[in-house]
Image (tube, rainbow, N blue to C red):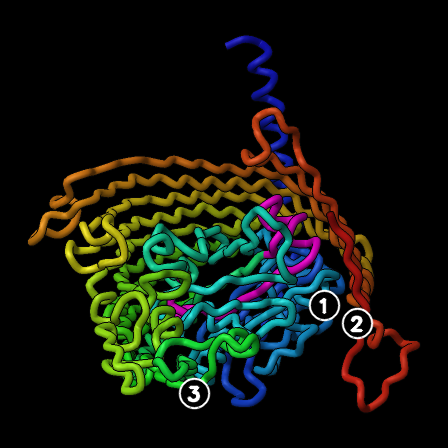
Amino acid sequence: MTLQHIRLLGVAAAVGLLASLGAGPVQAQQSTIAGQVTDKSSQQPIAGAQVLVAGTSLQAITGRDGRYTIGRVPPGQYRVQARLIGYATGTTSVSIGAGQTASADFVLTAAAIPLEAVVISATGEEQIKRELGNTVGTIDAAKISQQAAPENTADLLNSRIPGVEVMQSGGTTGTGSRIRIRGATSLSLRNEPIIVVDGVRIDNTPQAGSLENFTGGQAPSRLNDLNNDDIESVEVVKGPSAAALYGTDAANGVIQIRTKRGRPGPTKWTGYAEGGALNDKGDWPANYFSRQASGTSCRLSSMARGVCTIVGVDSFNPLVQNSPFRTGVHQEYGLTASGGNEATTFFVSGAFQRERGVFQSNDLRKTNLRVNLTNHVSRLMDITANMGYVSSLVNLPQNDNNDQGIVASGLLGFPFDTVAPSAGVSDPNGGYRFLTPAQAYFIQVSQRVERFTGGLNVNFRPTSFLTMFGTAGYDLTNQGDNQLTPPGVIPLDQNRLDGNANANRAQLFSYTATFATKGTFRVSPEITSNTTVGVQYYKNVFQQVQAAGRKVVAGTSGLGGVVVPSVGDTTAPFVTLGGYVEELVGVRDRLYLTGAVRADKNSAFGTNFGNILYPKLSGSWVVSEEPFFPKPNWLNSLRVRAAWGK
């Protein structure tokens, strides 16, 4: 060992000795804050609430009795907050001396006041809405699911938040919807917002797969793979904050979804079953035929020129008289279990859905499973694991922009059924123009999906002013699209009369990795500072093998019976890497100023394109809490906010 090594060891030993000698007095000066959190309406303790000391990283989670204890608190004056999604944030001031224990109890109101609502930021931490200068729409999904019973996740978002438009599909069972936040932002690129579930970005393709090529435009949506009964809250980020914190892909907005968590206490079981009937209630118009004495057609323009004379009008409605609709059936069953102790909590759910649509060839089967585990490793670290699985099979009918479409064939059909008495015309299609419903039902189109989404979130608080957030996630979708037109059934052209088949197999891989560090400082008793530095990585890979064939041999099904086969494949990787810095300054818990900038490297720009910078400035001022502001009885609160971004 060299002399230099010996000197270094000696210095380290001296530092360690000084640290051990100083540890006693410092530890003796530290104090404790303890108390209980209860519900105002029921007077019952609230388990799982987060209690934190503002201006520090010190916090605790309430146990099943609603009690908490926060140690290692230096002497001084602090604001202590109690937060829980679905409740208004409780705040109180505490003055604590060296070695003392201060009491701080909270009574939370269940109906969250808008300014005090808790939202999840891009870094994964919880923030109070009053601190944000940009607009964030929130949905209490758990409450809506009980009161309104939305059918799927898209239905949960519909008409809930200003500026968010859910454009419904034609109503076919199993099809998806398009979502727009503040309208479309591009004429040529995708306009869908990105979806983040428990910190993990997932694939949200509005028309997933290749089914729209076989059904006239109908296709499932990957957003509806989620079971809306597993969702606790939804937040929609609009404006400059989306791009500044989430990067290039967030130009269309961000939808953050938080699934349910367990709370300390005995295991709570919840089961549900629902059922119903589906019926077509469309007021379909009839088809008309204006005829002259000979029985042939006579148009109004021809009659005006004296070419012919209308002597009668025939009408017939094939969608009513030869209705293609049936009474559909909806069934759904679910079971959840949640609970745990002060160290570990869990939420487990399972659901099965079966829906037979109003068309004979329309059917959906879906199974959802979810497991969420949270472990408070110590007062310094929390770990949450989230896992979701869905298996679905959907069969879609022929409709929409499609000459094989059932409704289109009826709307463009003939004004007579089997015999038109005035003209003696026979129609073997029963009034339908292209195909009868029975013919269209021979065309089989289906999609099978197996999807797994998993994520791991870690919060580490090594010191009283430093917090680290880390998230790693994986979203895998195995998707199989199948189409079969049997031979000798569809007489529209020779290709379809010969029969054809398609089988496309796709895999979608999505990887998410984020890391952020936040430093929280009390500059003075009235000013706090939160500085966050983070990096985000996202990779999406789409791989597909397409197989198709023409001239299907009678008596066979699928690609095994085609005479003229063809194959192809597609691979499309997509990568985003970004880093950001954000500074939030709070003054007297009433004025909040935020500045942020993000640098993005996106593979869509090409390898020779440099970083893109996304700046952001925002401010939020709760004017009604200022001493000079009048306190009229009709005004609860008044906040002025502004945000600018690029």
Q: Residue furthest left?
A: 555
Is any part of residue 376 visible from this angle? yes
Going from the N terminus, do you reach mark 3 or mark 2 first? 3
Number of numbered discs overlaid on the protein picture: 3
The disc placed on residue 311 is 3
Mark 2, residue position: 639
Mark 1, residue position: 130
Is any part of residue 372 visible from this angle? no
Q: Could you say where residue 167 lies in the image, as x and y percent from the top left?
A: 52, 67
Rate crowding at label 3 as few (under 14), some (14 to 19) or many (20 or more) other CA atoms within 10 Å. few
The magenta region covers 226-253
Identify which amino acid the numbered label 3 is placed on. Answer: Val
| Secondary structure type for disc 2 | strand
| Secondary structure type for disc 1 | helix
Report how far apart the C-alphas of labels 2 and 1 lie in the structure.
8 Å
Report how far apart the C-alphas of labels 3 and 2 lie in the structure.
71 Å
Foreground: disc 1 or disc 3 = 3
Taking depth in this image into account, of 542 and 309 the one nearest to the observer is 309
